[in-house]
Each structure stands twice: as structure tokens, then as C-alpha cells.
Amino acid sequence: MDSSDDDFYSGEAMDDDYDYYNSDDAEDNDDYEFIEEDPDEDIDNLTSRRQQQSYTVLKEDDICQRQEDDITRVSTVLSISRVDASILLRHYNWCVSKVHDAWFADEDGVRKSVGLLEKPLVQFPNAKELTCGICFESYARDEVLSAVCGHPFCSACWRGYISATVNDGPGCLTLRCPDPSCRAAIGQDMIDKLASGEDKAKYCRYLIRSYVEDNRKTKWCPAPGCEYAVDFAAGSGNFDVWCLCSYSFCWNCTEEAHRPVDCGTVSKWILKNCAESENMNWILANSKPCPKCKRPIEKNQGCMHMTCSPPCKFEFCWLCLGAWSDHGERTGGFYACNRYETAKQQGDYDEAERRREMAKNSLEKYTHYYERWASNQSSRQKALADLHQMQTVHLEKLSDIQCTPESQLKFIIEAWLQIVECRRVLKWTYAYGYYLPEHELAKKQFFEYLQGEAESGLERLHQCAEKELQQFLTDESPSKEFNDFRTKLAGLTSVTKNYFENLVRALENGLADVDSHAACSKTTSSKHAGGASKGKSGRGKGSSRTGGSHDTGR
Amino acid sequence: MQASRARLFKEYKEVQREKSADPDIQLVCDDSNIFKWTALIKGPSETPFEGGVFQLAFAVPEQYPLQPPQVRFLTKIFHPNVHFKTGEICLDILKNAWSPAWTLQSVCRAIIALMAHPEPDSPLNCDSGNLLRSGDTRGYQSMARMYTRLAAMPKKG
Ligand SMILES: [Zn+2]
Ligand SMILES: [Zn+2]
Ligand SMILES: [Zn+2]
Ligand SMILES: [Zn+2]
Ligand SMILES: [Zn+2]
Ligand SMILES: [Zn+2]
């Protein structure tokens, strides 16, 4: 083992009781706060712990319950029937306070516009027979039905009318009396009385959908097939939400979660990707020629550390195609694969040449960021699949082989969760980087430094979780090294988490701390190193970490 | 199908009984198909359509009266909400504002009202709509009157 490994796990991180989640800087970032450990905790809980209280994921039952509660409140406060309360709430987009305000300001006006009548418009006190207003047949009094307005229709025509409207779409929620001169609202009581079972179900579906879609506070989870909704309380600057289906998305723009990058940057970036998609197809191809032997190498792993097949066995970086061994040294001592350097423009270009060069550069620049964005995206997908595989198959197997209870293998799940989350953040920082103004040199350097730190940490963590774990899965008997592996992976998880927290915080700050860059990197590095014993700071520390440490445990 | 036929038959009998109830509308059922009707309507007075007689064609769907009938002008008419070539009519009650309590007779009445009160903001005939929207009422009226004379009036002489 390389001595440099000490750098990224030490102190409390080594303790078997995992209290590294309580490390001192956890309190200023509730987002990732893992409060206390519970041995029976499953992944759902881990995921839900990431949630702030600013939103709630609603299952269908919860949605119905809230809807019922709102209806009850309005019906109690206004002393009207639940059917009328439901009609009113739908009209005011399910906002209870708006209903109350409007009602108490002008009850008559509200009744009129919504179509809630207090007494009949037409009455036939002495008629034995009434003519249905749709089929024009005569019926005995007790064979016709009316809403409050009193316009008579036979039940066959009511059924036809309701069925036609329900099958025409959500407009059935604002159903009115069939008489064209009448605006009386038709509520759920009439639907219940007259619609077929199938139509009733459709109506209820529309009612629930309306509660989520017309309500300003709720949205459906955009994941395909997911039927949960998210209720979001305004006031938090962070819009990322984690649905119970495990999909995370931005509540504000409903793109996938993109913290710390703002919605505007994300939508610009997505548009750009659409416009450039033809030029970029080659990037999405999953194979590249080995930089040494030129045979095509397929990327089927999540981390960027590639190893060519025997006999070549060349180890290189998927992103920059440089040798992995000099990945740190070549780049001046720290991880710099994330950096984009504009080609030097010198000499006497004529105008046409200069333009061509600029066009080439701008495509090159975009390609650089897009490739990294896309690679992290696919890396995240791979990590998600691996996490799933781990939970469903490998964990149990590993538990048997290493004679360790599954509850003590949680650190592996936590590592994978961290990888998935970091790949997401890292991916979006490349969209951020693309739009970072070229002339803000100090900011750009600060950003690339933080991003590089985070990325190199993540590569180690991903490699450790992905590759180093393999040997323990194939062991015949419990391995003595397994405990070291636990310490290393848990430590890497903690360190990477810290790097990413720094990155997220800095980006959300608009890189405002650029001036205190040096001071900042000093404090943070001593923090995740777990104490002053690893007193090296900034880049010096980075170099000792990066050089050659990748082969650890192989 | 049976319900729509029964309903149309009611309307048919009503038309026969009250032939002169509305002198501006003359509804005629096709000899062999109760789902096909034509109507002759008189252009409303004090409009450029005054003095003209316009023919409408009705195609009634099987879901009638839950679904509205399809109506179009057979007589050429210069009106913002009527397609100049096909005679198609843009009128809310023939689309989403339809009510099954409407009848063919009341549709005719609504079309006469539309002739008197065009809606230039949802035009099917852009030339006509633009004239009205630009405030050129005289231009609109003279065009409309010309077409009424050409297409909707019995040839003199
Ligand atoms: Zn009826
Ligand atoms: Zn009514
Ligand atoms: Zn979901
Ligand atoms: Zn967003
Ligand atoms: Zn090779
Ligand atoms: Zn690289």
C-alpha cells in the first residue's frame, strides 16, 4: 500500500462506528446530513435523509387525503356541502386561502361565476310530466333528474351527457347543466349517481390530477412510470427533490436535479446539446482507440481509469487519453483533466483564418465540456445499476463470504450512493464551467481547482468501490484485508463528500470566495485529512495523493 | 344511433308543425337520410347580408345531440368566421361550447347571430377579418354586400 493513502482517510473516519457523518462541517449543510446510524436502515431511509423539510413526496393516498382535508376545511368554514367545496377549490386551483378570501369578499359574485346556485331557476310545481331537454321525450316527474337549477333531463340523457364529457378529458371537472342558458355547476354527487363505474374512476383520476397539476405547490415526479407527486414549500433556494422512486429532479424546472447549477444555465445547456447533437454523436459512442496499441477499448465501467486488455494492459484516462500513471505529474502536480485550455492564438492570422480558428476553438471548447458532462452522466447510470446489483445480489454474497452481517456492510451502499450523487453534481459543474466567462480568470482557476479536487477524489472512490471490491467477492474465505478495505472505502466516501460539499457551496456562492482561495483550500484540506498531522496544504497535498496511488489494492 | 334518430325525428315533427314559426329559417330534412339536412336562412337586416338567402348543409353525427352537427355554408359568403372556399364555420357552440339541449333550429339562429356579429379575432377568412380588425368597416361591408348580391340573391331579369 502506498503511504499517500493515509492522506484521505484518517482520524474519526477510521472508526468502525462510522461517526464520520457527524464531522464538524456537517451542520452547515443539512442536505447531506446523515444524522445518526441505525443498523437496520435501508436505502429508502438513506435517500429520505437527504430530503430537507422543504418538500414532501406524496403517494396517491396522501394526495387523496390532502384533497379530502382541504375540502373538509372549506366546507366547514363556508358552511357549504363537500360537493360545492370541491367545485370551489377546483375553480381556485385548490388554494384554500384564495377560496376563503374570494368567498368572504363577494359570495354572490363567486357563486355566480362558479355556478353554485342556492335555489332553482325553473320550477314546475304542478306538472305531472316533464319534457327532457335533450331527447324531448315526456317523462313522469320521478323519472327526470335535475341539478339545483331544476332543468329536467331524463336519466338516459344525463348518462350520455356525463359519459361524453368524462371521455372528452379533464374538462368534465367543470361540467355545467346541459341547458345552454344555465351555468349551474354539476358536481361529483351527480357523477356518482349517474356515471358508469369506469367513468366514475376516470372522473376521480382527473380530480386527483387536477389537485396536483393545478395546484401551485405540487408537481408530479417526472420519472417515467412514477406516480408520486411532490409538494414543495416555497422559501428554499434549493429546488432539488428526491422522489421515493429514487429519481431526483429540480422542482422548479422539472429537469433532473442539477444543484448547484441554476435552472437558466441548465436549460441553456440542454438547448445547446440539442443543437449540437449531430456533431456530438461520436462522444456518446462507448469505445475509443487505446492511445498505445490503437485497438478499440470499450468503456463498460463507471470510473474513468481504463486498462487496455492484455497483452497491452496500458492504463489511461478515458477523458484525456493520457497515461493514468502520470495523470498527476504531467499536469503540474494536481488533477487537471477537467481543465479546458484554449489553443494559443499567436502569429499573424488573416481575418478568414482567425474566424476559422475561432469556430474550431468554440467547437473544441464545447466538445471538451460536453464529453465530460456526458461521461459523468453515463458513469452515473452505470453506478446506479451497480448500486442496484449491490443491494440485490452482491451484498448478501459478500456477507456470506466475509462472514460479516449485512448491517455492517452499509458502508458499501453509502459509498455507492455517494458516487451516484457526486457523478450528478460533477456532470452539472461541466455545464457551469462551459458558461463561466473566459475573462474571469481567477474565478475560472478557482473553479477548476475545486472541480479537479472533487473529481480526482471521486475517481478514487469510484475505482475503489468498483474494482477493489471485486476481489472480496471472489474470496474463498474471509479476507484479512477486508477490514482495511472497509476503512479505505468509508474514508474515501467521507473525503469525497467533503470535496463535493466544498464545490457545491462555492458554486452556489457564485465563486465569491475566490479571493480567500488559498486560505480556503488550506482549511478544507486539513479538515478532510482529519487533523493537523496531514499538514500539507493545497496543491502540494494534491500531488502526493495523485501520484501513483491508483494501483492501491490491486 | 336510435337515440339520435329519435331526437332528429322529434325535431323533424317540430319543424313540420311550426313551419312558419321563424320566417327567417327553413329547415329541410333529406328525403332518404334523417342525418342530412339543409337550411335556408335569410341574411339579417341592417347587415351586408340583408336580402340574401344562404343555404347551409348539416351532417349530423350518430352521437347527436351529445356531439354537435357539422354545418357549412353552401352559398358563398364573405364573413370573417366562414371559410371562403369550403364554407366551414368557426362558431364556439359548434365546437367546445356545444350543449345537447341545442337543436338544428337553434344552431341556425346562432349562425344568423354570427352573421350580424362577426368575431374578427378568430378568422377563417383572413381578408375579411383583416378589414374589420384594421377598422375598415366600409371596405368589409362593400365586399360582403358584393358577394351577397353575386351569390345569395335570385338573379334578376
Ligand atoms: Zn332525455
Ligand atoms: Zn340548469
Ligand atoms: Zn418518482
Ligand atoms: Zn431547475
Ligand atoms: Zn492498448
Ligand atoms: Zn485525464
Image (spheres, coloured by chain):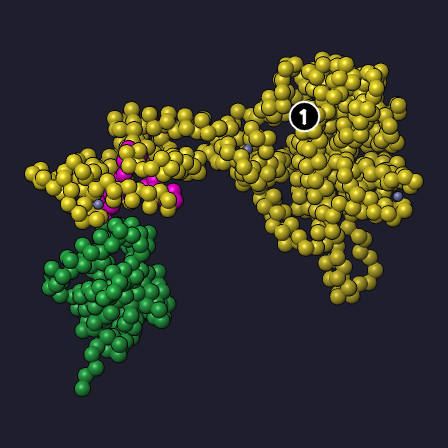
Kind of residue indicated by mark 1:
Thr
Predominant SS of the magenta segment = loop
Looking at the image, is B26 positioned above or below residue A494? Answer: below
- Asked if residue B93 lies left or right of residue A234, the reply is left
Choose top left, top right, bottom left or bottom right for residue A63. Answer: top left
Q: Nearer the viewer, residue A266 or A116?
A: A116
Q: Position of residue A362 (x, y in %)?
A: 72, 54
Q: Residue at x 44, y 35 (%)?
A: A212
Q: Residue furthest bottom?
A: B157
Q: Nearer the viewer, residue A278 or B127?
A: A278
Q: Which residues are magenta?
A: A169-190
Q: Residue at x 85, y 25 (%)?
A: A553
Which image quarter holds the C terminus of chain A? top right
Q: Is residue A173 magenta?
A: yes
Residue at which label 1 appears: A392
Looking at the image, is B15 positioned above or below residue A399? Answer: below
- Asked if residue A11 lies left or right of residue B17, the reply is right
Q: Is residue A199 magenta?
A: no
Q: Position of residue A527 (x, y in %)?
A: 74, 22
- Asked if residue A58 lies left or right of residue A337, the reply is left
Looking at the image, is B152 positioned above or below residue A51? Answer: below
Q: Residue at x 45, y 33 (%)?
A: A217
Q: Which chain is green?
A: B
Q: Nearer the viewer, residue A192 or A179?
A: A192
Q: Which chain is yellow?
A: A
Q: Nearer the viewer, residue A411 or B17?
A: B17
